[in-house]
Amino acid sequence: MKILMIEDNKSVSEMMGMFFQKEKWEASFAYDGNEAVDMFNEDPDKWDMITLDLNLPGKDGMEVAKEIRKVSKTVPIIMLTARDTESDQVLGLEFGADDYVTKPFSPITLIARMKAIHRRDENLAEKLAESTPVNAEVEEADDGFDINTGFFKLNSNTREAYLDDKEIPDLTPKEFDLLKTLASKPKQVFSREQLLEQVWDYDYFGEERTVDAHIKKLRQKIEKVGPQVIETVWGVGYKFDDSGAKTKA
C-alpha cells in the first residue's frame, strides 16, 4: 500500500514509519493540514490509505478530510484523535472518515485496522470487476438491484440505495456496507460484534462505538428521504425493518 500519514507529532510518524516499512508499505508524511492537502492533490489516485490526525496546525483534521472528500469519495481515511467523545467521532465520520482510532493507540491496532479496510476494498473491487457485464446492452433489462423489497432498493454495483424511490444521499463506503449488511437479512438482529466482523473485518481490535457512530450518521441520511428503517434492539444490537415504512407508504 501507499500510505499518506498526516500527523504533526514527528515521533509518532517515525514510529509508524518503522511499522509501515516492516509491512513493505510505502509511506509519505505530512505534518500540517495545508501540506497534507497539497500532497494529496498532487496525485489523488496515488494513495491507498490515509491516516489523519484530528489536531493539526494550519487546517485541522476535519477540514483536511473535507478537502480530500471533495476530490475522492473512496480513498480510505482513518482518523487519529485524542478526543474520545461521541460527538467528535460522529463529526469525523460526517466529514468523510471511514474509521477512527483514539490516542494513545497501539501501532499493531492501527496496522490491523488498515489491513482490514484495505482487504475489504480489494474484495469489493474484485466483486465489481466480476459483476461488470461484457455486453452492457444485454444487461439493460435487469434493474441491477440485488436487494429490492419494493420500498427499499440497493445496487451493489453502483453503490446506490433508495428508500421510497428516493436516493439516500452521500453514503460513505462504510455506511453503504453497513446498510447492505443489515438490509440483506431483514429483521435479523446483528450485534455490534457481528457488524464489526462483517463490515469492518475486525475481531479483537474492534471498538463497538465505531458501529454506533456510523449507525447514527446513517440514520440521519435515511431520515432525509423517508421513515427510519434501522431499529435498535436494546442490549443486543441493530436490525433493518422496513415493513412498517411500507405500510405507511
Image (cartoon, rainbow, N blue to C red):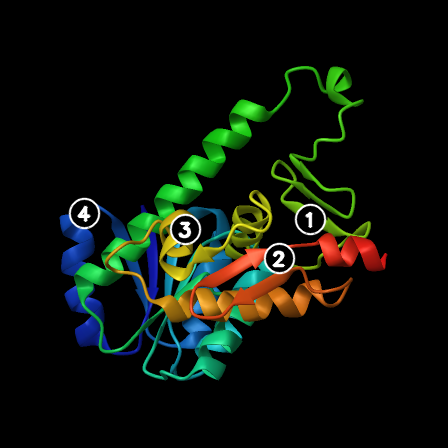
Name the residue beneath numbered marker 4: 23
Name the residue beneath numbered marker 1: 161
Question: What's the distance in space between the residues labelled 4 and 1, CA to CA?
Answer: 36 Å
Q: Nearer the viewer, mark 2 or mark 3?
A: 2
Whether residue 26 sits left or right of residue 129 in the image: it is left
Which of the two labelled residues, at mark 1 and mark 2, occupies the earlier sequence position?
1
Q: Nearer the viewer, mark 4 or mark 3?
A: 4
Which of the two labelled residues, at mark 4 and mark 3, occupies the earlier sequence position?
4
Question: Which quarter of the figure is the C terminus placed in?
Answer: bottom right
Name the residue beneath numbered marker 3: 47
Q: Position of residue 123 (x, y in %)?
A: 42, 36
Name the residue beneath numbered marker 2: 171
Which of the two labelled residues, at mark 4 and mark 1, occupies the earlier sequence position?
4
Q: Nearer the viewer, mark 3 or mark 1?
A: 1
Residue shown at 78%/48% (left/top)? Answer: 151
Regarding residue 59, the answer to whether it shows in the image is no
Q: Position of residue 91 (x, y in %)?
A: 52, 77
Which of the two labelled residues, at mark 2 and mark 3, occupies the earlier sequence position?
3
Name the residue type under label 1.
Answer: Ala
Q: Nearer the viewer, mark 1 or mark 2?
A: 1
Above or below residue 34? Residue 167 is: above
Q: Choose between 88 and 214: the one closer to the eye.
A: 214
